[in-house]
Image (cartoon, rainbow, N blue to C red):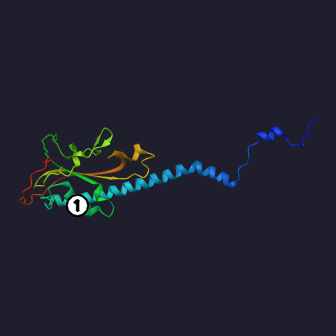
C-alpha cells in the first residue's frame, strides 16, 4: 500500500521551480519592455518629423518670399541661398549642414480648354530616389536658377537627419543616403517672382535655368 504521506520522488522531479516576485517581474519586463520602448521612440520620432516638417515649410516660405521680391536675384548658388536666406529661419530647429535645395525655372502654358501646364505638372511630392537610395545630385549647389523678374519657379528643400529607430524599422522611417540611414524631410513650393527691377550681374545662369 502506497503511503500518501510521503512525497512521490518522481512527482518532485517533474515539478517546476517557483519563481520569486523579482523573477516574475524580470520575465514580464523582458516580454513587454522592448515593444514599449520601440513604440515610445517611434512616437517621439514621428513627433520630431512633424516638428521638422513645420519648421522647414515655414522657413522655405520666408526664403521664397525673398526670391519673389528680387532680394536674392544675384545669389548664384544654392549654398549661398541656404546660408543667407533659408538657414536663418530654421537654425534653431534644423542643422544647416543637412539642408539641400534646388531652384528650377518652369515654363508654364495655358489654353482655353484648361489643358495647359501649371505647377501641379512639376510637383511630385515624392523624394528623389535612384535604386532605393536618396539621390540629391540635382540638389547640388550649382542647381540654382538665377532669379529674374516674372519667372515661374519650383523650389524644393530637403533636410536629412539621423533616425532614432532606423535600425529597427528601416523601411518605414528612413532611406539610404551616403552609406547610412537618414530620415528625410522635404518641402516644395511653386511661385512666380514679381516684376521687380533687375540688377546688373556678371554671373551666368545656372544649368537649372
At horizontal 37% and vertical 55% (from top left) the residue drawn is 50
At horizontal 17% and vertical 54% (from top left) the residue drawn is 77
Outermost residue to the front = 179
Q: Residues within 10 Å of mark 1 (few under 14, many from 20)?
A: some
Q: How many marks?
A: 1
Res 61 quadrant in image: bottom left
Q: Position of residue 202 (x, y in %)?
A: 6, 57
Q: Position of residue 86 (x, y in %)?
A: 24, 59
Query: 107 or 206: which is nearer to us?
Result: 206
Q: Position of residue 161 (x, y in %)?
A: 35, 53
**In this rendering, would 58 be left or right of 114?**
right
Query: 115 or 181: which is nearer to us?
Result: 181
Outermost residue to the top = 1
At horizontal 15% and vertical 60% (from top left) the residue drawn is 72
Q: Position of residue 139 (x, y in %)?
A: 23, 49
Q: Name the secondary structure under disc 1.
A: helix
Residue that numbered label 1 is attached to: 83
In the rendered image, the quadrant that contains the N terminus is top right
At horizontal 43% and vertical 47% (from top left) the residue drawn is 167
Query: 26 or 68: which is nearer to us?
Result: 26
Amino acid at each position: 500500500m502506497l503511503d500518501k504521506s510521503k512525497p512521490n520522488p518522481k512527482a518532485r522531479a517533474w515539478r517546476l521551480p517557483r519563481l520569486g516576485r523579482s523573477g516574475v517581474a524580470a520575465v514580464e519586463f523582458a516580454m513587454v519592455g522592448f515593444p514599449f520602448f520601440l513604440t515610445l521612440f517611434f512616437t517621439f520620432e514621428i513627433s520630431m518629423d512633424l516638428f521638422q516638417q513645420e519648421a522647414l515649410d515655414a522657413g522655405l516660405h520666408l526664403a521664397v518670399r525673398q526670391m519673389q521680391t528680387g532680394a536674392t536675384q544675384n545669389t548664384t548658388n544654392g549654398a549661398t541661398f541656404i546660408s543667407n536666406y533659408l538657414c536663418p529661419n530654421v537654425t534653431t530647429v534644423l542643422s544647416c549642414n543637412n539642408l539641400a535645395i534646388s531652384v528650377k525655372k518652369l515654363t508654364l502654358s495655358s489654353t482655353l480648354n484648361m489643358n495647359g501646364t501649371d505647377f501641379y505638372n512639376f510637383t511630385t511630392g515624392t523624394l528623389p530616389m535612384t535604386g532605393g537610395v536618396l539621390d540629391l545630385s540635382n540638389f547640388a549647389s550649382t542647381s540654382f536658377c538665377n532669379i529674374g523678374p516674372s519667372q515661374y519657379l519650383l523650389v524644393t528643400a530637403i533636410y536629412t537627419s539621423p533616425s532614432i529607430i532606423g535600425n529597427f524599422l528601416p523601411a518605414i522611417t528612413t532611406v539610404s543616403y551616403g552609406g547610412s540611414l537618414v530620415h528625410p524631410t522635404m518641402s516644395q513650393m511653386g511661385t512666380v517672382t514679381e516684376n521687380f527691377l533687375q540688377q546688373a550681374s556678371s554671373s551666368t545662369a545656372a544649368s537649372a535655368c
